[in-house]
Amino acid sequence: MPTGFGYLNVLGIGEESTYDTEVAATQRVPFLSTDLDDQLQLYPVETLEGRVNMRPPDAGHIVMGGSLSTQLRYTLANLLLKHGLGTLSAARYTMANTRENLGLSIGIDKGVATVGFRGCKVMELTLTSELERVMLDATIRGKTTIRPSTVNTAAILAALSNSDTNVLHRHLNFRIGDLVDALASGDEVGIASLTWSLTRPLDEVFTNQAQTVIQPLDDGRPEMTLEIVVPRHTTDQYKTWQNAGTTLQARAFWQSGARSIELLLMALTIQDAPVPTPGAELLSTTVTLMA
């Protein structure tokens, strides 16, 4: 039996044409870690039967999901972004009202075996740009785990490649301003970090028909936030905008050669913009905005 080494793992993602029907991965994902797995809920039998030991627990529902941490690259048609937001058209990702019947198949070659996850949906996305590394983290909820996967075999996953350039923090051009006019070079801000988060609540309902969840569906309004860290405090403009309740727009644009990624947020409100005095060092501002 082979020994599993993390650095030998390969992860691929494919887009399901029929929800919860596994498909071969088409996109290799440069990931750093994942804890995708299924968990069997055990229900102890606590009846009183005249002795201290209990009967074996009953097997209950099976919950599948976990986190996936990836390094963002200038990859066309990023499937995590597409399924987190819901729509991809003409290289533009936009929010869809519902993601019903949209699902991902994820295959992982762990060295000792390949495992497949199908019927996967993105519940949370977090894009972090700082210290040169730009990360895209996802929280996944799925329906079915296959061990071993006969669709996403080691050979299928090994044949995938991703030679795209890494997105770096120094590639970023960031602009923020009010809605009076279009953002221009005068609205550029040098920031130490940027964190964009999207949460899309999913209802996870079990019925008497299976141990696994029925298809999770969007449940309630998405929540989106943007946080930036401005390392040199030179103006109270953010506090002024916050006090006035000014609606803002922001543009984050990463570019390397002919490849680029652009994040546009057109209706932002500052939730918090504190300027603490921590000590003798330079003052910085952490601005949290609701999108």
Image (spheres, rainbow, N blue to C red):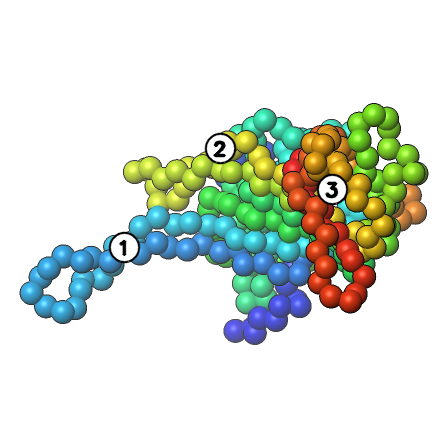
Q: Nearer the viewer, mark 1 or mark 2?
A: 2
Q: For the residue carrying disc 2, how many other residues have a C-alpha within 10 Å: few (<14), some (14-19), or many (20+)? A: few
The residue under the point 75% across, 36% down is 241
Q: Spatial distance from mark 1 to mark 3, Cα to Cα?
A: 52 Å
User: Residue 117's x, y, as percent?
Assistant: 52, 49
Front residue of 290/87: it is 290
Front residue of 152/128: it is 128
Identify the amino acid type marked 1: Tyr
Q: What SS does tag 1 mark?
A: strand
Marked residue nearer the N-terminal end (2 or 3): 2
Rendering quarter of residue 265:
top right
Front residue of 242/90: it is 242
- Can residue 167 be seen here? no
Q: Spatial distance from mark 1 to mark 2, Cα to Cα?
A: 27 Å
Q: Nearer the viewer, mark 1 or mark 3?
A: 3
Residue hosting label 3 = 239
- Can residue 185 be seen here? yes
39 to 110, vertically: above or below: above
Q: What SS does tag 3 mark?
A: helix
Rendering quarter of residue 5:
bottom right
Would you say 138 lies left or right of 186 here? left
Identify the amino acid type marked 3: Lys
- Label 2 close to label 3 by CB (< 8 Å): no
Q: Which mark is residue 219?
A: 2
User: Residue 285's x, y, as percent?
Assistant: 75, 52
The residue under the point 55% across, 42% down is 123
Marked residue nearer the N-terminal end (1 or 2): 1
Residue hosting label 1 = 43
The residue under the point 74% across, 48% down is 228
